[in-house]
Amino acid sequence: MISSMKKIIYFYILLSFVFSQLAYSTNLSEFTQRPKLVVMIVIDQFRADYLTRFQNQFLPVEKNQKLGGFKFLMAKSAYFPFAQYDVFQNMTCPGHAMISTGSRPYLNGIALNDYYDRQENKIVYCVDDEQDEVSPRRLNSTTFGDEIKNAGLNSKIYALALKDRSAVMLGGHRADLALWMDYKNFQWRTSSFYAKDLPVWLKTFNQKIGAMKNDEVVFQDKKVKLFSRQGLSLQYGIDQSFALAEELIKNEKLGQTSNLDVLALSLSTHDMLGHFLGPNASELEKLTLYEDQRLSQFLNTLKKQLGSLKDVEIILTADHGVAPTVEYAQKAKFSSDKLDYLQLYKKINERLDDKFGQVKKSWIIASKTFHFYFDQSLLKEKKLNSSEVETEAKKALEGLTGVHMVLLRSDLLKGIFPPGELGEQVKRQFTPDISGDFIIVPKAFFMEKDDNLTTHMTGYSYDRTVPVIFFGAKFKPGVYSIPAKVIDIAPTLNFSLGVLPPASSEGQVLPIF
């Protein structure tokens, strides 16, 4: 009996091995055949369930020789419905950096959107650059596009998004151009890191925008200018992003030579409206359906310009998810609320004053996204080491409603991390020069109090779970249930192109060949 059971077990082990080898194998001629165009599409704040919730309302896969949008990619691609970010704080700059580098923040250096720089004594932004104003210099890795250039291929690489950080993190160091919206004058722009001047065709494109600057639309019973932050958080932001992508392809002749070209497009609009209304608002459903229609138009335009999509690879994913609004969560009978920084400051300052003696200013010099930084001059003046002050700050916050845990920098530097998956998430994101002196980990459905109705900055499933889709001749279509991580995108893509993964890549090549 035991012998028979062993034979059955060995048989299934052998069968699994055979299938795994088949999944990972491709023939040499297929492997060496490169596409002419790679299109990377990232939808900002596009939680995985946007595709599963609304799929019955999407355009059909194909009708009258017209390609659909999301459903076309879902049906014709290798589709991972619930791929994961495996860090404890998910937001735009780190998300795009993980997509492009295949590595986590502790390696690529992009841990937060904004943080307090202890050397510069100020809050800095992830793409700040004193020399060129905006650049990828804070990114400590090559990207998938950089490695294409490093391989000596005569490729054109372009990245665009309404947000500068999204375009820059996707474009990397060697993009021919990274483009984003200048919210001062509502024109597409770049920085001197990429180019001294814009191409003529883009100047013409900007002139057309200038002619529409006073155009208005009604949203929630109010007139809104199309070219305003609010206007671009509606379907017009989607239109502008896709329109520029189409102009790029046409004017730079992307995918229309024997070379491999890259277009990386991040759709920031979904995030802008999502913060304002939350993921369960009817307006977000309508926006998703509009994105589906505009994606369909883009795919059909691409097919017409290139003759077919046989030489095109398309990757679709998101940089993070989003939490439900507090109101929605409370109606669903979940414990949920917002943590007020003013109240947190008060609790911390009172505790530290009581323990170390009252001071005339705050013990905390800066805070951002639940990272708190001490005034080191004050600690020096009081002859205190940071670890003992961190410990008292933790005591002040422990037990507060909505606070799951307080992480201390002194502990993390010693390699003391929380147990389980949370500890692993923290290890992957903690960056000594960037992370705070102490960090609050909120409970599920709790978030910081700010101008947004809802936000994202945790490792809970609603913030970390996104779709990943690979479309192209080399990829075997199907819905894949195997675990996939966002850091797998860059090494999988570059494997399909026959070039090295990015320098700091930690991901694996997904079994879709």
Image: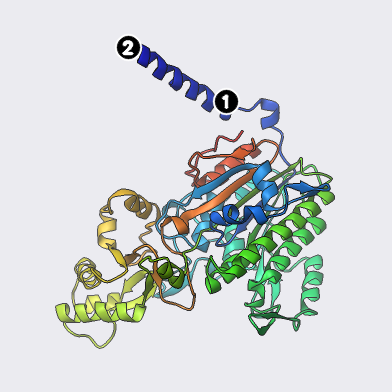
The amino acid type, in three-letter code, at marker 1 is: Leu
Image position of 444 with respect to 51: above or below: below
Viewer-proximal residue, 400 or 199?
A: 400
- Tally of numbered tags: 2
Residue appearing at x 39%, y 57% in the figure: 88
Tag nearer the camera, 2 or 1: 2
Residue 39 seen in render: no
Q: Earlier in the sequence, mark 2 or mark 1?
A: 2
Q: Position of residue 382 (x, y in %)?
A: 19, 78
- Please tell me which residue is depicted at 28% across the width and 78% down the height of the picture: 377
In the rendered image, residue 115, in percent from the top left (x then y), is placed at 42, 69
In this orientation, does residue 208 appear? yes
Find numbered disc 2 in the image and state the secondary structure of the residue it sits on. loop
Residue at which label 2 appears: 1
Say which of 374 and 344 sits in front: 344
Q: In this rendered view, identify the residue nearer to me: 501 or 9.
A: 9
> Tag 1's secondary structure?
helix
Q: Quadrant of the N terminus?
A: top left
Badge number at residue 22: 1
Crowding around mark 2 (Cα neighbors within 10 Å: few <14, some 14 to 19, many 20+) is few
Q: Eyeballing the image, is 209 above or below 482?
A: below
The relative height of residue 437 versus residue 226 in the rendered view (above or below) is: above
